[in-house]
Image (cartoon, rainbow, N blue to C red):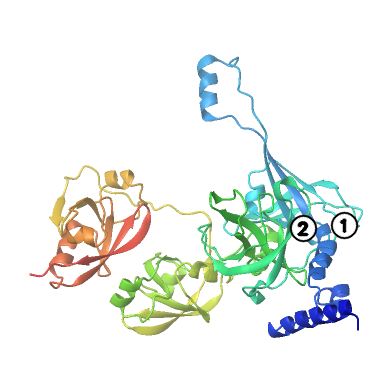
Amino acid sequence: MTKSNKNLSYSTSAILLALAIFGYSGPTPLGPVGQAWAKSPDFSKVFADIARNRTEAVVNISAKMKPKSSKGEKQLREFFGRNFPAPPKRERQSLGSGFIVEKDGFILTNSHVVSGADEIIVTMGNGSGGNKGKEYKAKIVTIDPKLDVALLKIEPEGDLKTLNMGDSKLLEVGDWVMAIGNPFGLSQSVTVGVVSAKGRIIGAGDYDDFIQTDAAINQGNSGGPLLDYHGNVVGINTAIFTGGGMNSGNIGIGFAIPINAVKKIYNDMKKGHIRRGWLGVRLLGVNKEIAKKLGLDSEAGALIETVKKGSPADKAGFLPFDVILEFDGTHVPSHMALPKIVATHKPGSRVRVIIFRDGKKKTLTVTLGEFADSKAEAANTDEAGTKKEEKISMGMTIEKLTSKWTKRLELDRSVKGVVVTEVDPRSPAAAGGIRPGDVIISIERKKIRSITEYEKAIESAEPDSTLLVMVVRNGDTTIAMLKVPKE
């Protein structure tokens, strides 16, 4: 054996040994490369095969928005007359990516790529097909801003190449993935990396559950596919994080929507209406103090703050301060996770829910309603012209929540309680995290609708005890821990 052959043999053996150590024993990826897998340890050929055979199904999306007159411009024209010269307007354009999922022209992308568009142009990708570079006008079938997914339809000439939606649940941290898209308008770029994390919450919405990858994703990649090494779509590239904020440049932290979340609503999207299960509760997180107060042995679960009257949860017997631990056999790790779990169930589904109430686990059965995007406004009104009432207690000044305060604090009319107007910085109220502008709605699970009810709750508290105080702050509900002084 020659020296070069000996080195090649050692190199090949080392790579095969490394593959064995890392435990690869999965199915062979992709046809021709899969057949050659046993003969060649060159993993890069797998990605070359994906790039060669999958890019034809990835498209460039250009969404154009016509310029609209601003309110200020209209006011100027009204003042100076119709002959007032209008400032030059530029057509806005959003560039992104997408991928074909059905041969007759159904395309998935991000909703933020096409939302508000007056015209959408889809440009076909590279490949050996006759559609290369062709442009089609697309129409929006359905937009789901909550998941940030949109389904488009074009009318192609003949059948199109498609991508297969895989199983994102099988992904593990460290798995290889490839992103295909059109960054900065550059067509058909591919990047390779690994799954850096799963279940990432980045504040994008109620259904945050992103795959994090270090495969380079930049502006223009939004809506493009994230592929596993079998060439199946496991995610939709959606956002990036940089030192300068979201969507400004790649530093190796990109986020993709798991494809399983899309698969669950895809048939509804084709019908133009997404149906999601609805429970009818408002949730809070469980922190260390709350867990101790309620007698929980961990901070897992979703704490119910309010139950909407007449909702499925109300009919099933859910109560404020119940902690949902398990929903239809699925563990609920946090209050952020529960909306996503509920949304995967169809309206009318009958599910078993394990809750924690008064120190014990209990099972409730609920028939889910249908989630509606439109929020009904409460018709309740406050009495007007009442005399100002206030009380100084626990180092804070509280007043009755009048319609004036409701308007000033931009509260929903359904909110009832007492408003905190001043807080002594050295008081128990300040130490417990209560701030001016907070609206106290309950103390120790008892609703507070007046100053009298507040006084009774404080006076009945044991000295040196800690009270669970629920407040509304900036439209959100949170919990403060109010320490009662020793006598």
Q: Residue at x 88, y 52 (%)?
A: 131
Distance between mark 1 and mark 2 Cα atoms = 18 Å
168 on left or right of 51: left
Q: How many numbered discs sit on the rendered protein? A: 2
Q: How crowded is mark 2: few (under 14 residues within 10 Å), some or many (20 or more)?
A: many
Q: Is any part of residue 472 visible from this angle?
A: yes
Q: Is any part of residue 343 visible from this angle?
A: no
Q: What element carries label 2?
A: strand
- Along the line of sight, which residue is nearer the eye, 167 or 454? 167
Q: Is mark 1 on a helix, strand or loop?
A: loop
Image location of residue 46, percent across then percent down: 80, 70
Image location of residue 29, percent across then percent down: 80, 75
Check disc 1 and report the residue beneath it: 127
Image location of residue 221, percent across then percent down: 69, 53
- Along the line of sight, which residue is nearer the eye, 172 or 309? 172
Residue 106: numbered disc? 2
Residue 313: quadrant of the picture: bottom left
Q: Which residue lies furthest to the front in this view?
A: 3
**Which label sits in the foreground, 1 or 2?**
1
- Along the line of sight, which residue is nearer the eye, 76 or 318? 76
Tell which circle, 1 or 2, labels the residue nearer the N-terminal end.
Answer: 2
Q: Label 2 sits on what residue type? A: Phe
The quadrant of the rendering that contains the N terminus is bottom right
Decide: is 117 above or below 360. Answer: above
- Along the line of sight, which residue is nearer the eye, 165 or 175? 175
Q: Which residue is drawn at 37% across and 53% down?
A: 475
The quadrant of the rendering that contains the C terminus is bottom left
Image location of residue 369, percent across then percent down: 52, 68
Q: Label 1 sits on what residue type? A: Gly
